[in-house]
Image (cartoon, rainbow, N blue to C red):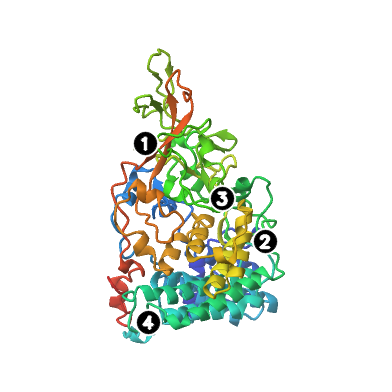
Amino acid sequence: MKRNILILLIALLTGLGSCKKDSEFLNITPTSILNNEQAFSDPAQVVSILANLYTRQADFSSFNSGWTSFADFGESFPSDAGSYGIVQSNQWNYDAWNSYNYGYIRELNLFIQRDSAAKTLSAPDKARFMAEGRFLRANYYFEMAKRMGGVPLILEPLLYDFSGDPTYLQRPRAKESEVYDFVISEAEAIKNLLPATANEKSRATRGAALAMEARAALYAGSIAKYGANTPLVSLPGAEVGIPFSKGNEYYVIALRAAKEIIDGKDGYALYQRKADLAENFAQLFLDKDNTNTESILIEDYKVKTSKVHGFTTNNQPFSSGEESANGDAGRLNPSLNLVESFEKLDNTYAPLPYRDASGNPIYYNNPIDIFAGRDARLAGTVMLPGSSFKGQPLDIWAGYKLADGSVLTNQDASKLVPLPGTTTPVQVLGKDGPYDGNEKRTQSGFYLRKYLDPTPGAGSRGTNSGVAFIRYRYAEVLLNAAEAAFELGQTADAAKYMNMVRARAGLTIPLTAADVTFNKIVHERRVELAFEGHYLFDMKRWRLAHIVWDGQQMTVSDLLSNIGVATKRNTQPYGFWPYKYYNPGNPNNGKWLYDIVLPSKVTGTLRFRLGNYYSQISDAITSANPKIVKQPNQ
């Protein structure tokens, strides 16, 4: 029976073959089912098993069809007819974002058990493999905890005896704090068994273990502190909720773990390789070689293998898209809500100046001029009107604004129309949009830049992209340290860590200790970590989600007020459309102006219910195991 279980494990894990060195982690080929001794006698075979286990970690979203996960939360608009439901729904299902994969936990437990029993592996290999298995298990328990709260902590492979009575296999949910305590203790136990280097990206290192510890402890600390604001989001057995009294204990752990990376000698540093700060920020997410000392742990991809992704194919600008004719382009459109959140270079918040004090349009010589003097992360995260991709200017404009305020446009940019008083047909719509309801082109006025690969072929179905997804990076570690320090009253240190991140974005006026507030902590994470899978979970752990997504409609006044305030509502994604002004003889003729637009497909208002703080555990699970307590408020 035990041999069959291992064969099942290998059957699930293989399809990935020998990998001779870490740099060839993705150059893997199928292998046959192996017995116990064979599987854990050859380091290359163990690495191939690990490769599969790494790919199955629970990220917030995938780089393929999972782009829709980022087209939510008011941060972006889904320009895809099949995905309009995202902005037409009024609430999320209770099972949204859940992850409860004990099949994966079982395989990790088996891996750890088999590695421990291996007799022919060298001691260094055996120790590293063991530490990697424990890292993956701890990290997945963390991923479950931040979605589900307390879950059963199963740390050994369970065997069914076929007696007809499975009750001895049933385990109750641990307390939420116990899961976080496990993650923290595992990180401490394994950190010095892993390579202490910034040069390894696709496998666990000492830095990855510490980054996991810092993030997990920060989550636990904030759930303890801010969970007091939502007393209904709890269970009597503490399967959900962490006592307020434990908050500072977790913040101390988070700060210590982050400082071990910051003050250590493993070689991590912010990516600073290009003089243009926006280009530098964008390149950070494309450069996955060992010289990118900011990446700590990545989910790697490689062209000309079976492991590539279509994130660029799905989201590239229409005019330069390699698959535009086949309908692959422009799906994920960042919202004006997000764009407005980026600060001015003097550390102040202000709406983009599109109207004067009297409500009249402000005219610009170039469409990009309105974005001047902003945090460089804006242009490094979002493709703006007037910017370029792959060396080609984007063609983003919604038509001609005429003297009477009407608009001359056309749904099809290739169909030319004469301007009033002329007979020569001209283009009256940007090839990249926006036009209301025109899918696969921007409908917000913006395209995503972060993670979009400009390499030829990266936007084609036949090639796709090998850009890696970064699971942990150094800038987040700095922000984790800043938040933990702030919560512990160490505001000078918090300012120091935040200033390191902000200076890279061109915000060269340092924050003082007095400048560091909860609002500033929330804002900094939003703009630095946009489209990396943090926003939802940050809102949840701070117990802000039901406030930010309150189900109420937004007005333009709502959109433009309270920028930089943590509780600012974000229930509907707005757009910002540029127009060419046509009024011959007027000094502004030929210049650019903007309008704020709510796309017509946005008919819903995002509502986060108290029951959404912890994802639903299915009835099938609770029926099979009556010891599993259901989530509150569902």
Mark linked to residue 377 = 3
| Label 2 element class | loop
Mark 4 to mark 1: distance in Å? 49 Å
Q: Quadrant of the N terminus?
A: bottom left
Report x, y in % for residue 85.
31, 49
Classify the position of the C terminus by image quarter.
Answer: bottom left
The disc placed on residue 438 is 1
Mark number displayed over residue 238: 4
Real-space Cα separation, disc 4 to disc 2, in angstroms: 39 Å
Choose the circle earlier in sequence order: 4 or 2: 4
Please say if 493 is above or below 315.
Answer: below
Q: Residue furthest front?
A: 358
- The residue that label 2 is drawn on is 269
User: Do the CB atoms of the residues marked 3 and 2 lie less than 8 Å apart?
Assistant: no
Q: Earlier in the sequence, mark 2 or mark 1?
A: 2
Front residue of 181 and 276: 276
Q: CA distance from mark 2 to mark 1?
A: 42 Å
Amino acid type, callout 2: Ala
